[in-house]
Image: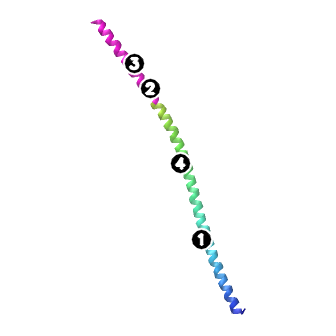
Amino acid sequence: MSETELEEGMISAAARFDRALARLGTSARDLNTRLQRQQRMEVDTQRLVHERARLATELDKTAARAKRLDDSAHEVSRRLVEAMETVRSVLEKAE
């Protein structure tokens, strides 16, 4: 192998090596970008999980309060009916 061929081979190998390093650098940057994006998604997911749990607790409390109000309204209605019946009974006796 002549010196010129050896030199051309070295230049060619160096060029291939430079291209490989450039691709490696690009791949490393892309991977880093994807990892950062994934970390942000994990943080957002955790935030959503906590928010969902908070909202579920709030909904449970609100549903319990609504049931108590409904039960109270039913009891008031029952007492009003009893009171009206008592008034009617008294009025009928007075006639």
Mark 1 packing: few (<14 Cα in 10 Å), some, or many (20+)? few
**Badge 4 element:** helix
Image-based side of 24 in relation to 63, left or right: right
Picture layout, residue 55 above or below residue 82: below
| Cα distance between the residues tagged 3 and 2 | 12 Å
Residue 55 sits above or below residue 95 on the image? below
Question: Nearest the camera: 75 or 33?
Answer: 75
Q: Where is residue 94 in the image (x, y as percent from the top left)?
A: 29, 6
The reply, left or right, for residue 92 in relation to residue 54 is left
Query: What whole-number distance in Å separates the C-alpha atoms at marks 4 and 1?
Result: 33 Å
**In the rendered structure, which amino acid carries the disc numbered 2?**
Asp
* Residue on which the image places disc 1: 26
Give how far apart the Cα atoms at labels 1 and 2 are: 66 Å
For marks 4 and 2, the one nearer the N-term is 4
Q: Locate the N terminus and report the quarter of the image it occupies.
A: bottom right
Which residue bears the numbered disc 3? 79
**Between residues 70 and 54, which one lies in front from this camera angle?**
70
Q: In the image, what residue occupies the spot 34% across and 14% down?
A: 85
Predominant secondary structure, magenta span: helix
Identify the residue position indicated by label 2 in the image: 71
Tell me if label 1 and label 2 are in contact, CB under 8 Å: no
